[in-house]
Image (tube, rainbow, N blue to C red):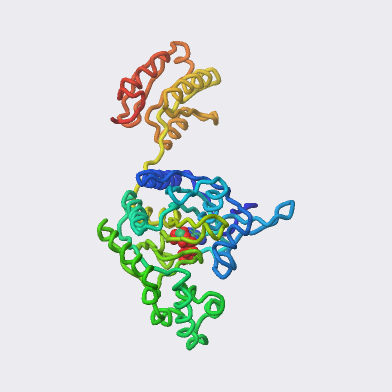
């Protein structure tokens, strides 16, 4: 084979597509129930849209971005996540105000130059929501509730919500100093990345996945012990609302998340059915990002769900999605029969029935086998005799019943089966 898909990318093949469609449908429906409307932004942006917001010392900006110069030498980047793009789009199109809530969702491919492994690709998909305009803790709780609702609607169990607060620009510096003081004593034992994080952004130390750093991370000071009174009160209210909503969660005081723009509430949904890369959803509040983009001060919160990981859990949970089937397969012998078939297929499709025929000049028995493989509901068989009498045998593939139906009455027969003009079993 001459070509292979680029490293870290995957084809979603026709057999897998129904699962993806079911996931996408559940995302749209659930987001809609919470009054989110879709926004679609370009898959690439000016590089600064990401570098300025996500943070220079994060893994994403420091080593994972797909950045390239276009033909005019502009620096562009394939989006590694969508929050920054959504903020850019909302500001550019004047969608934001402080006396109105904007709730938007997105769904699409993201790009990160990572080492491909289980649960990690270079092109992957996320669905996510962003709500702009309120700093109220009830919105934090509703956002967490929405993520849980989505997984419930997909029939998924064995998920847990991790919740933490990363404070605000007032209390974070104090915590950062406490972390630096603590980790300074263990620098020699930490991984190379962590030694860099120590200098550039000590908060990121808590996010390290390396085994050798874990025992130091476990003993490190916790942000929730360093929150200022306002952040403390906010966190307590978020927890209160979550309890009121009966959303189960656990406080994980190590949770910091991989992007710099988060303030106060951060959360992740993790699955017991995944390996090391066990987070299916991550999100949090980002009250200063809009201002940082040059807008007004508009508080916001959101989350993103990793769809590959979701698809993997669903595959494991045997959450079956319907295989698509063709309603009518018309087996044809000869050019003239095919012309009739084309006319009948047009009528079928006008009625909303899926239809197909033979394009390979196969024998009748090969065509019947093909129809079987396609899961055809009905097969209509047209040869020379049938052309002469303008009538042919219609075979119900499920019951193997066969009856003679004139060309002109084919679709009244279909309608007769269920009254809706299709071959379903309702
Ligand atoms: P991780 O710690 O697993 O690298 P992250 O903090 O980089 O996650 P986020 O930026 O929070 O991830 O993205 C939200 C979700 O998107 C993750 O929980 C995960 O399900 C999914 N995700 C992130 N990166 C990838 C990737 N390279 N391949 C597949 N899914 C991904
Ligand atoms: Mg990552």
State left or right for residue 250 relative to residue 327: left
- Considering depth in this image, is 114 or 143 the residue closer to the camera? 143
Q: Residue furthest right?
A: 72
- Considering depth in this image, is 93 or 125 the residue closer to the camera? 93
State left or right for residue 420 relative to residue 98: left
- Considering depth in this image, is 160 or 346 the residue closer to the camera? 160
Task: Name the residue at 48% across, 76% down.
Answer: 173
> In x, y percent, where is residue 203?
48, 74
Q: Judge whether residue 353 can be spotted in this image.
A: yes
> In x, y percent, where is residue 419?
31, 22
Asked if 242 appears above or below 346 in the picture, the reply is below
Marks counted in the figure total 0
Q: Quadrant of residue 412?
A: top left
Asked if 265 appears above or below 203 in the picture, the reply is above
Q: Residue furthest top?
A: 389
> In x, y percent, where is residue 1?
62, 52
Asked if 274 appears above or below 99 in the picture, the reply is below
Q: Judge whether residue 118 can be spotted in this image.
A: no
- Considering depth in this image, is 365 or 298 the residue closer to the camera? 298
Task: Name the residue at 49% across, 73% down.
Answer: 204
> In x, y percent, where is residue 251?
33, 69
The quadrant of the image that shows the C terminus is top left
Q: Quadrant of residue 171?
A: bottom left
Task: Name the residue at 50% across, 64% down.
Answer: 261
State left or right for residue 382 relative to residue 112: left
């Amino acid at each position: 084979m001459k070509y292979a898909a680029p490293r870290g990318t995957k084809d979603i093949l026709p057999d897998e597509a129904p699962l993806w469609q079911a996931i996408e449908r559940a995302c749209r429906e659930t987001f809609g129930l919470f009054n989110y409307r879709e926004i679609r932004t370009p898959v690439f942006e000016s590089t600064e849209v990401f570098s300025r917001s996500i943070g220079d010392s994060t893994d994403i900006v420091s080593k994972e971005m797909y950045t390239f110069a276009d033909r005019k030498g502009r620096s562009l980047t394939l989006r590694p996540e969508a929050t920054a793009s959504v903020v850019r789009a909302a500001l550019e199109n004047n969608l934001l105000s402080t006396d109105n809530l904007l709730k938007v969702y997105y769904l699409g491919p993201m790009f990160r130059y990572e080492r491909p492994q289980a649960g990690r690709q270079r092109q992957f998909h996320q669905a996510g929501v962003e709500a702009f305009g309120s700093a109220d803790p009830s919105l934090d709780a509703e956002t967490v509730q929405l993520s849980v609702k989505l997984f419930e609607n997909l029939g998924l169990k064995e998920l847990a919500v991790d919740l933490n607060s990363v404070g605000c620009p007032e209390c974070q510096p104090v915590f950062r100093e406490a972390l630096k003081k603590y980790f300074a004593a263990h620098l020699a034992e930490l991984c190379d990345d962590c030694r860099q994080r120590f200098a550039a952004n000590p908060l990121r130390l808590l996010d390290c996945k390396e085994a050798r750093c874990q025992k130091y991370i476990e003993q490190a000071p916790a942000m929730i012990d360093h929150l200022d009174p306002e952040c403390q009160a906010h966190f307590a209210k978020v927890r209160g609302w979550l309890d009121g909503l009966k959303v189960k969660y656990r406080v994980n005081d190590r949770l910091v998340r991989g992007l710099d723009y988060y303030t106060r509430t951060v959360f992740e949904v993790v699955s017991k059915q995944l390996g090391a890369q066990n987070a299916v959803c991550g999100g949090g509040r980002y009250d200063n990002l809009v201002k940082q983009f040059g807008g007004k001060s508009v508080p916001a919160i959101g989350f993103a769900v990793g769809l590959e990981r979701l698809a993997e859990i669903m595959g494991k949970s045997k959450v079956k999605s319907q295989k698509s089937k063709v309603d009518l397969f018309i087996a044809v012998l000869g050019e003239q029969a095919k012309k009739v078939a084309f006319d009948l297929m047009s009528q079928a499709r006008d009625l909303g029935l899926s239809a197909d025929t033979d394009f390979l000049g196969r024998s009748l028995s090969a065509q019947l086998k093909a129809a079987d493989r396609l899961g055809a509901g009905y097969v209509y068989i047209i040869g020379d005799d049938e052309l002469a009498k303008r009538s042919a045998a219609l075979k119900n593939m499920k019951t193997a019943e066969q009856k003679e139906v004139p060309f002109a009455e084919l679709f009244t027969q279909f309608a007769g089966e269920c009254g809706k003009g299709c071959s379903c079993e309702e």
